[in-house]
Image (cartoon, helix red, strand yellow):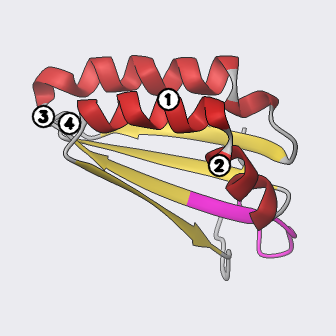
Amino acid sequence: MPKISEEAALQTVITTFEMTPGTCQDLMDELTEAYAQFISKQPGFIAAGLHVNDAQTRIANYSQWQRREDFQAMLRSEEMRLRNRRITQLCRSFEPVMYDVVAAFD
């Protein structure tokens, strides 16, 4: 489970995917499989979550990594490059963006 904390020395990546309701479940299946079989087993992976909006036109992915380089190495792997080609076919666009936590509230 992701932990959001200003004190945590980690890399946060938020990726948004834009798709049609007709491909939402297919994309969610692809992302779930990628996390279960590959991403969660990569060095530096901490946790992740997948969120779908009510209209099923957007998926937001929140992931945490030990270091920026760990996330980048996962993205550049041959396995993930192949998976991203399939993911690209299921959505209009997706964009991973790296963030630092500057404030958290309970």
SS category of the residue bearing label 3: loop
Residue marked by disc 4: 54
Residue 74 screen position, x and y as percent: 70, 45
Q: Earlier in the sequence, mark 1 or mark 4?
A: 4
Secondary element at tag 1: helix
Q: Please identify, in this view, whether the residue under mark 4 or under mark 3 is nearer the observer.
A: 3
Proximity of marks 4 and 3: CB atoms separated by less than 8 Å: no
103 shown above or below 74: below
**Vertical placement of 10 versus 85: above or below?**
below
Cα–Cα gap, marks 1 and 2: 11 Å
Q: Residue furthest bottom?
A: 102
Q: Earlier in the sequence, mark 4 or mark 3?
A: 3
Q: Secondary structure at mark 2?
A: helix
Q: Are marks 4 and 2 in contact (CB under 8 Å)?
A: no
The quarter of the displayed image where residue 30 is located: top left
Q: Which residue is mark 2?
A: 76
Please provide the residue range marked out in magenta.
3-13
Q: Earlier in the sequence, mark 1 or mark 3?
A: 3
Q: CA distance from mark 4 to mark 3?
A: 12 Å
Q: Amino acid at mark 3?
A: Thr
Q: Label 1: which residue? A: 83
Disc 1 to disc 4, C-alpha distance: 25 Å
Marks 2 and 3, Cα distance to the nearest angstrom?
Answer: 27 Å
Q: Nearer the viewer, mark 1 or mark 4?
A: 1
Residue lying farthest front?
Answer: 78
Amino acid type at mark 4: Asp
- Give the image quarter of residue 68: bottom right
Residue 20, numbered label: 3
The quadrant of the image that shows the C terminus is: bottom right
Q: Residue 9, how many percent across, how many down? A: 87, 70
Q: Residues within 10 Å of mark 4 (few under 14, many from 20)?
A: few
Label 2 vs 3, first from the N-terminus: 3
